[in-house]
Image: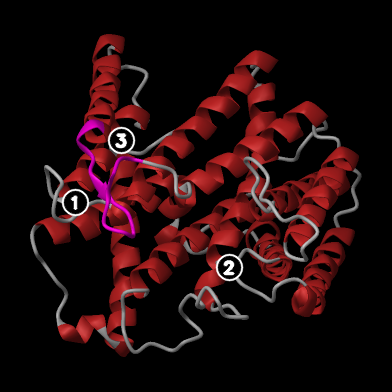
Amino acid sequence: MQKLPKRLLSIDVLRALTMFLMIFVNDASGVKHIPEWIDHAAGNADGMGFADTIFPAFLFILGLSLPFAINNRIKKGDSSLNILIYILTRSAALLIMGFYHVNIETYSLTNALIPRAMWVLIVTAAFFLIWLDYPDTMAKARKYTLIGVGFALLIGMAVIYKGTDEEGRSIGMHTSWWGILGIIGWSYLVCACIYFAAKGRLSVLVGALVVFAAINIAAHTGLITEKLWVIGDASSVTLTMGGIVISRWYAEWAERGKTKLIPLFFIGAGILLIVAGLLIRPYADGVSKIRSTPAWVFICSGITILMFQLFIYIVDIGGKKDFLKAIRPAGTSTLTCYLMPYFQVFLMELLHIKFPYLLMNGLGGLLRSFAVAFILIWLVGLMEKKRLRLKI
């Protein structure tokens, strides 16, 4: 493995902002009478809103941080087998969580044994029991008992699950798609395995990126008519591998003392990707998050690279470590932050609590969404101090 510089705080800050905005746009999707450009674009539209840029940025940031995470394990002396187990178990955790949460969409509101909200709350609480960052001082017997309870709850919720398909027929848990966490899990698994097998060699990583981008283009120009196993149309792995390549490029140039070239390269790469996305848009199914088109992949990759360079300048070079301090927990306990809205939304559903009209429409609704994002991240910050955070 090639050496990497010390941890880039800019990645944590960029991840925190992205997680904050993810909570905001997801909450704002239920607000009526808001500007169209803020929300997600319709599935059949040739266009994208601000909300459509958040998830791809998260996948790209996953790629940015992946080399640091694996290389840090190598520095700690982890064997190749231990690192591979780490990759597999981390991926499995994300896939399990994604699988359970995606089945919320088809949960029966009339025939199930328990209310949907209670089912979701139990499942999400089980995630915390299984993947909590337990302190080293905790007795192993107690730790494994809590983990066992978590798995038992998941199994129990799978057994009692009752769903309904589009035709009203009763169905069990299934994989219509893998959900946000599942997509992240598959993308992480594929890209982390490639990075590990390639030992971080930039030439191999660039080659993988080119192949993934080509598959994505082929899938939206009719050259490939069937989605491929695991990677689908390769949109998510293209985004993640793009982050890995940028991270490795940064490391290689920093190691050679060519730091002055980094901003020129990143700004140029970001602009070129945006232009490439606009150019390919008419020929590859337009631009759409729902259809995960190449134009969407390229444009969002370019935007994220430009934001990354901006944060490098502010945080790593400018030394403003407290930049966006208020939402810092979203960058350090990101998965915990992602799961918090499930407690908020479904606890309100269980207790039949609704926001007043003023907070469900227009500017009032948007301000509410900002407040919800801040409050949930603030709560995660308090939970961090008690070590109540997920670690996978």
Which x, y percent locates residue 324? 48, 64
Give the secondary structure at mark 2.
Answer: loop
User: Residue under circle 1?
Assistant: 116
Which x, y percent locates residue 55? 54, 61
Which x, y percent locates residue 33? 34, 89
- 349 shown above or below 138: below
User: Residue under circle 3?
Assistant: 128
CB atoms at circles 1 and 2 under 8 Å apart?
Answer: no
User: Residue under circle 2?
Assistant: 289
How many numbered discs sit on the rendered protein?
3
Q: Nearer the viewer, mark 2 or mark 3?
A: 2
Magenta stretch bounds: 159-173
- 149 shown above or below 270: above
Does the rendering let one see residue 199?
Answer: no
> Of callouts 1 and 2, which one flags the residue occurring earlier in the amino acid sequence?
1
Residue at the spot 61% in from the left edge and 80% down from the top edge = 47
